[in-house]
Image (tube, grey):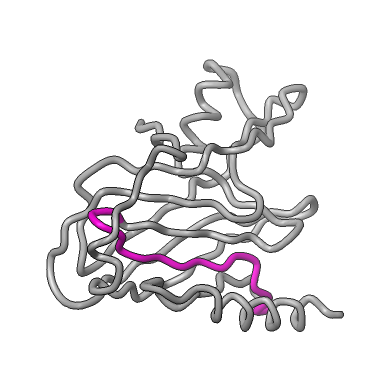
């Protein structure tokens, strides 16, 4: 089965599973149009919750990857540091609290002075937010998706409904705070 067919089947399956206040899933693709990462988001109580799914064999980096790498390097030079995953809200909501994320995995190779932290499979990002206007929010997820041979900058635009799930609660207990600069 080709990667394109696997991605199409996964997208159809994901769409049926991702109902209930979630935005429509958006695929972040490489230059050839292959989906590497799928994202969705929803307003749950007072939190914007973003879910990121990297396809098998790929991963994305933590929201504070650069900070974690800088701490691990302790002033030493590095061969390079991968991009942080970013969530940008352009309308409908504003962030009023710090971000939380799934606890990042350590992908570091200290012998090369290369430190990186991120997520394989499904990860969750969340922040306390306030509504600013409208019935939906525009959210963009930017990340660097990598496999064992290459890295690709990816972006997914989401239209998040602000009506469904607003009464639900959300707990950040299973997440860790994003380290600020």
| Residue 163 locus on image (x, y percent) | 23, 74
Q: Residue at x 45, y 76 (%)?
A: 19
| Residue 9 locus on image (x, y percent) | 70, 82
Q: Residue at x 65, y 55 (%)?
A: 121
Q: Is residue 56 above or below residue 111?
A: below
Q: Is residue 123 magenta?
A: no
Q: Is residue 180 above or below residue 97?
A: above
Left or right: where does residue 136 sit relative to residue 16? left
- Hey, which residue is sitting farthest left in the picture? 133
Left or right: where does residue 31 sit relative to residue 86? right
Q: Is residue 39 magenta?
A: yes
| Residue 40 locus on image (x, y percent) | 46, 68
- Hey, which residue is sitting farthest front in the picture? 168
From which residue to which does the magenta span run? 32-47
Name the quadrant of the C terminus.
top left
Q: Is residue 169 above or below residue 109?
A: below
- Hey, which residue is sitting farthest right in the picture? 1
**On the image, which quarter does residue 54 sit in?**
bottom right
């Amino acid at each position: 089965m080709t990667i394109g067919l696997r991605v199409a089947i996964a997208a159809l399956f994901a769409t049926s599973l991702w109902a209930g206040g979630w935005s429509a899933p958006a695929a972040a693709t490489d230059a050839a149009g292959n989906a590497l990462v799928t994202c969705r988001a929803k307003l749950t109580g007072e939190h914007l919750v973003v879910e990121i799914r990297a396809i098998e064999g790929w991963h994305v980096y933590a929201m504070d990857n650069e900070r974690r790498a800088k701490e691990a390097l302790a002033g030493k030079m590095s061969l390079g540091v991968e991009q942080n995953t970013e969530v940008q809200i352009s309308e409908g909501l504003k962030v009023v609290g710090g971000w939380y994320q799934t606890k990042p995995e350590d992908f570091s190779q200290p012998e090369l002075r290369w430190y990186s932290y991120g997520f394989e499979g499904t990860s969750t990002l969340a922040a306390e937010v306030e509504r600013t206007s409208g019935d939906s929010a525009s959210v963009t997820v930017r990340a660097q998706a990598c496999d064992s041979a290459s890295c690709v900058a990816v972006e997914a635009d989401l239209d998040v409904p602000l009506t469904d799930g607003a009464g639900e609660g959300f707990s950040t207990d299973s997440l860790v705070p994003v380290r600020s600069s």
